[in-house]
Amino acid sequence: MRSAELLGLPVVGPAGEDLGKVLDVRLVQDGPLLGAFAALRVEGLVVGTRRMASRLGYDRFDGQSDVKGPWLVAVCVRYLTRHTRYLPWDAAELSAGTVRSRVRDLPRVPPIT
Amino acid sequence: MSGRTRDLGLHLLDRQIVDPDGHAVGRVDDVELMVPEDGSPPYVIAMLTGPQALGPRLGGLLGRWVVFWSHALSRGSEAGPGRIGMELVTDFGTDISVSRTRLELGVHANEDRARDYLVGRLPGARGAER
């Protein structure tokens, strides 16, 4: 499977309601050992509608991180990505070119650690 | 214990891959995910580079056009994109370092062929060697 088959897929809720598209894939480095590092395992999906704004990353870091400014850009992009949500992989189901969420209310995107 | 988190689009895709000599190998145009049969979450097993990896990511007419011309120029000698296994990664940073040289990896056959048969034969092209 390639990431291109996952990124951009439409995401729907349990009742078929539109939740946006897959904007990014959250990985955690705790998979099987591959060479010097543990493999990057898929932990969840970043779901929303503002792909370009989301790619700047302001919605993935909390206020304590290095990604704070320029403040005007941060304010604008955080406003544009205010509806971006996180779909844990355990709650996702892939079928026929669509990602279906088993939960209706998705949490905000947890900060990258 | 949970490991470090990274986002695919922010930390992996479009990053430069560099070999032990510091030469650019290519960019991470896509990644290959292994889907375990036991139903556990997929994990990244390889980075894909070159137009045959980038095309599907671009999508649409442009993506198909990129893949078509890449196939046509490779004269059918390559079945897929350049593939670099994650076991070769030695460092994740602004760039992604790998333990093999560009020549050993051989992921850009079209570029290498163009260098050997076209650019390298131009007058004054000394230094175009690999």
Image: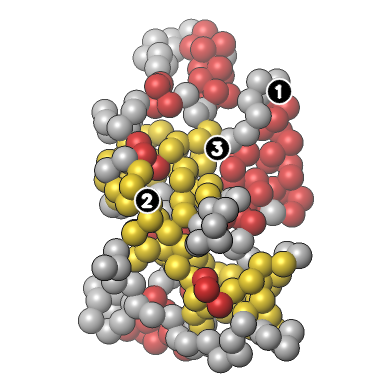
- Residue B50's spot in the image, x, y percent? 55, 37
Outermost bottom residue: A105
Chain containing the residue with disc 1? B
User: Nearer the observer, disc 3 or disc 2?
Assistant: 2
Chain containing the residue with disc 2? A
Q: Are marks 1 and 3 on the same chain?
A: yes
Cα gap from disc 1 to disc 2, whole angstroms: 34 Å
Reading the image, the residue beneath label 2 is A32
Reading the image, the residue beneath label 3 is B50
Q: How is the image coloured?
A: secondary structure
Q: Is residue A101 visible?
A: yes
Residue type, mark 3 in image: Gly
Q: Nearer the viewer, residue B114 or A34?
A: A34
- Residue B110's spot in the image, x, y percent? 58, 24
Q: Residue at x 54, y 57 (%)?
A: B38
Q: Residue at x 56, y 11 (%)?
A: B117
